[in-house]
Amino acid sequence: MKTYTLDDLIIKEHLLELAEKGNKPFTESLNPGVEHVLGIRVPDLRRLAARIARTDWERFLETSDTFYMEERMLYGMVLGCIRPDEDLEVYLHRVTCFVWMINSWSVCDTFKFAGGQRFVDRHAGRLWEYLKQWMNADGEYEVRFGVVMSMSYFVDEAHLEELLACYDSIRHEGYYVKMAVAWALSVCFVKFPERTMEYLKNNSLDTFTYNKTLQKIVESCRVDKDTKTLIRSMKRPSDKQRNVME
């Protein structure tokens, strides 16, 4: 298939041009160990994705490369800009192709479902099952994708109990999984403080994830001072501290 072009330029040329006004050292510092980072600013990538979505975006998806981290981000952003297919499974197949190319938290966390919350509400049952599959996957970024997306769209009355159970059952040792679970649980706490507090008093989280959850709750500007004091008192000693105490 013929390579996708925009304004007679291939996408790599657009990206290299945007990289000139980016901040590569800063972006690399946020994504340690990730290769081929250009440092393009996210708003610039989103504007490019929106332009692609108004053209022959199918050709873009079919001929897209994954050499640069930002190429992967752009692929996901375009999926978030297009009009979802009438066939939901066709769209989810494209999303799955994106998930397989995630190689950093930046690529993962900049993705949004096309159509936003209204799209999710319309297909809630299927999308919920789809995200649960990712939370049970083996890859670090696959699991993070499931956690972050469920946090973005399913922290609600109807899904809270099952959501907490899903987060509690995750046993992946990846750092970016643990941080995602902590982040998601802090969002649950902000939206449903009493029920999430009950969970925090009786859970199966490892010490690192549990303490990070408390830290993120304390860092929230939507939690009052007295509650933050209580949350701080719930911290567990680390494994290293426990060994010293013993």
Image (cartoon, rainbow, N blue to C red):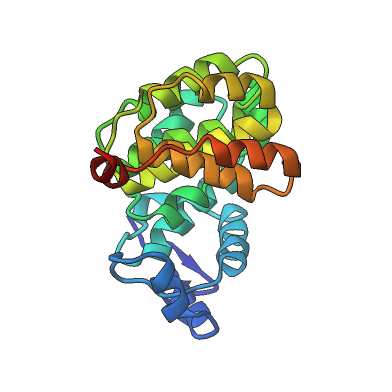
State the residue in front, 117 or 153: 153
Residue pictured at 74% horizontal, 44% vertical: 225
Q: Is residue 54 left or right of residue 140?
A: right
Residue 132 shows up from this direction? no
**Residue at the front extreme?**
246
**Would you place residue 8 above or below residue 62 in this image?**
below
- Image quadrant where residue 12 sits: bottom left
Q: Quadrant of the N terminus?
A: bottom left
Where residue 106 sits: x, y (%)? 45, 57
- Image quadrant where residue 99 sits: top left
Residue 120 shows up from this direction? yes
Q: Is residue 134 left or right of residue 91?
A: left
**Would you place residue 70 above or below residue 240 in this image?**
below
Where residue 65 sits: x, y (%)? 33, 60
Residue pictured at 51% horizontal, 15% vertical: 162
State the residue in front, 194 or 10: 194
Q: Quadrant of the C terminus?
A: top left
> Could you tell me how many numbered marks the image carries?
0
State the residue in front, 157 or 245: 245
- Image quadrant where residue 187 sits: top right
Residue pictured at 63% horizontal, 31% vertical: 189
Where residue 68 sits: x, y (%)? 34, 67
Residue pictured at 28% horizontal, 34% vertical: 172
Q: Is residue 80 left or right of residue 205?
A: right
Where residue 47 sits: x, y (%)? 63, 64
